[in-house]
Image: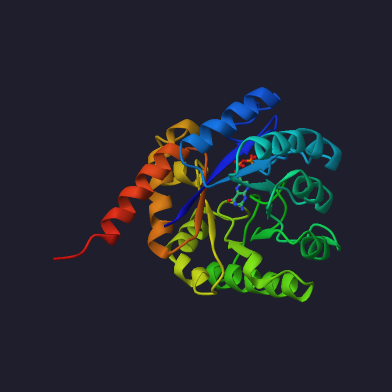
Amino acid sequence: MTRVMGVLNVTPDSFSDGGRFLAPEAALAQASRLVAEGADILDIGAESTRPGAEPATAEGEIARAVPVIAAVAARSDVALSIDTMKPQVARAAVAAGASIWNDVTALTFSADACDVAAELGCQVVLMHMQGEPRTMQAAPRYDDVVAEVTDYLACRAEAAMAAGVRRAAIWLDPGIGFGKRLEHNLALLANLDRLVALGFPVLLGVSRKSFIASVHPPAKLTENRLPASLACALAGAEAGVAAVRVHDVAETAQALAMWTAIRTASRL
Ligand code: HH2
């Protein structure tokens, strides 16, 4: 069954939940809520990667994320993921109880990233992004987006394994919305099976993203994008992704439970 990764951003400026869970008590309450709603994994992020976002310092990320990770780890055995590109932050998060390093730069942010991932021994999500968050949506260009993203992620998995990361610890993510136009996002969603065929678990992050408003203009506000987010999650489940990264955990868990029940019912 496709697992649900609940998003918990302890940032001032994330595109969907920025500023809402900055206070530690608010973050802990939201973590408990997401677990109660059916999250299998919580992805805690302390730097926004939305287009145009200003970079955070490692010290700032650690100060915001680590106390929340430590407090959630003390109260619950839900798997915890740290959404960061910085090895220093990943190291502090794993020490506090995170077991997954979710890296939107696929271990390319610094020269030591692969070595740190190998040393930490945690699970690692390698995500594809063209460019960097501040400017990535300016002029994304691909000749064959599906082939380029798939090849890139296969290469990054090889690089991680060459540094000593276990094959079984590697996840891949096509990076929907990260340096991609609408047609690129849709091509990747329509061909997720090609990424799944590489044999690594695939994580899909589509929740509330802006390409939804390009497909359906009334979904201009992020809070109005749940139906399309669910449609994308089910498309991911159909293609065999291992987990979906979402803001709306209860709704996604319900949609996936029904999809799984239908898929596993015997056909007459
Ligand atoms: N999307 C976002 C952040 N991190 N990580 C992975 N692996 N895949 C994604 O698709 C992904 C991600 C963007 O969403 P959000 O965290 O809600 O926003 P922000 O980056 O503004 O904090």
- Quarter of the figure that contains the N terminus: bottom left
Viewer-proximal residue, 174 or 2? Answer: 2
Name the one closer to the observer, 30 or 107: 30
Which of the 4 image quadrants contains residue 104?
bottom right
Give the answer, above or below, for where 67 lies relative to 245.
above
**Number of numbered discs on residues:** 0
Colour mapping: rainbow
Residue 250 appears at what percent x and percent y? Answer: 43, 37
> For residue 190, which quarter of the picture?
bottom left
Across and down, in percent, residue 242 comes to 49, 60
Looking at the figure, which quarter contains the C terminus? bottom left
Q: Is residue 24 left or right of residue 151?
A: right
Q: Residue at x 51, y 43 (%)?
A: 39
Horizontal and vertical percent position of residue 41: 57, 47
Q: What residue is shown at x 29% (from left), y 60% (from top)?
A: 263
Residue 260 in picture, x, y percent from top left: 33, 55
Say above or below: 112 vs 53: below
Q: Is residue 194 above or below residue 266?
A: below
Q: Residue at x 43, y 44 (%)?
A: 229
Is residue 221 in view? no
Q: Can residue 140 be seen in this view?
A: yes
